[in-house]
Amino acid sequence: MTDFDQDAVLAELDEKAMELRAKLAELTAPVDAETVIGFGKRIGDGTTQAIQQMGDASIAQSLAGTLDQVERAREKALDGTWGRCDVCQEPIPEGRLSFRPWSTTCVDYAD
Ligand SMILES: [Zn+2]
């Protein structure tokens, strides 16, 4: 049973995920090109390490955290539990959902 517009929610979440991935790519791209090779690290290892080293670390971490939430919310949209709290199963207030469609918990359990 779904009591929300699944297509609209998925479209909104996909758009947000794309925006977050683009921002993350922007934050990490210059590092891949120069710093990583300079330190002789493998690209895969270097990316995470480089993010931590940058002044943008907290921004990148926050973006990645939001992206996790967006992906979780997408799962919830697909299985019909979108709009309900992951912790207490109560409906998430509409105002919170319209502001952050990727909310997966009610305000009581917000991180
Ligand atoms: Zn809750």
Image (cartoon, rainbow, N blue to C red):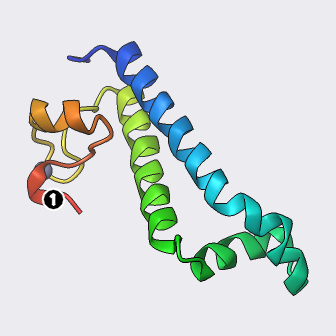
For the residue marked with disc 1, what is the amino acid? Tyr
For the point 11% across and 30% down, which residue is it?
Answer: 94
Residue nearest the viewer, comparing 83 with 46: 46
For the point 67% across and 62% down, which residue is it?
Answer: 28
**Number of marks in the image?**
1
Q: Is residue 64 visible?
A: yes
Q: Horizontal placement of 28 versus 95: left or right?
A: right
- Mark 1: is the Cβ under 8 angstroms from ligand 1? yes
Residue 88, given in percent of the width and then of the height, sits at: 13, 50
For the point 58% across and 46% down, which residue is it?
Answer: 21
* Residue at the spot of label 1: 109
Residue nearest the viewer, comparing 31 with 110: 31
Residue nearest the viewer, comparing 58 with 102: 58
Q: Horizontal placement of 53 versus 42: left or right?
A: left
Residue 6, given in percent of the width and then of the height, sits at: 35, 17
Q: Horizontal placement of 52 versus 47: left or right?
A: left
Residue 73, given in percent of the width and then of the height, sits at: 37, 39
Q: Horizontal placement of 88 versus 13: left or right?
A: left
Residue 25, given in percent of the width and then of the height, sits at: 66, 52
Report the quarter where the C terminus lies: bottom left
Element type at mark 1: helix
**In the figure, residue 49 lies in which quadrant?**
bottom right
**In the figure, residue 42 lies in which quadrant?**
bottom right
For the point 40% across and 25% down, which residue is it?
Answer: 12
Report the quarter where the N terminus lies: top left
Residue nearest the viewer, comparing 56 with 109: 56
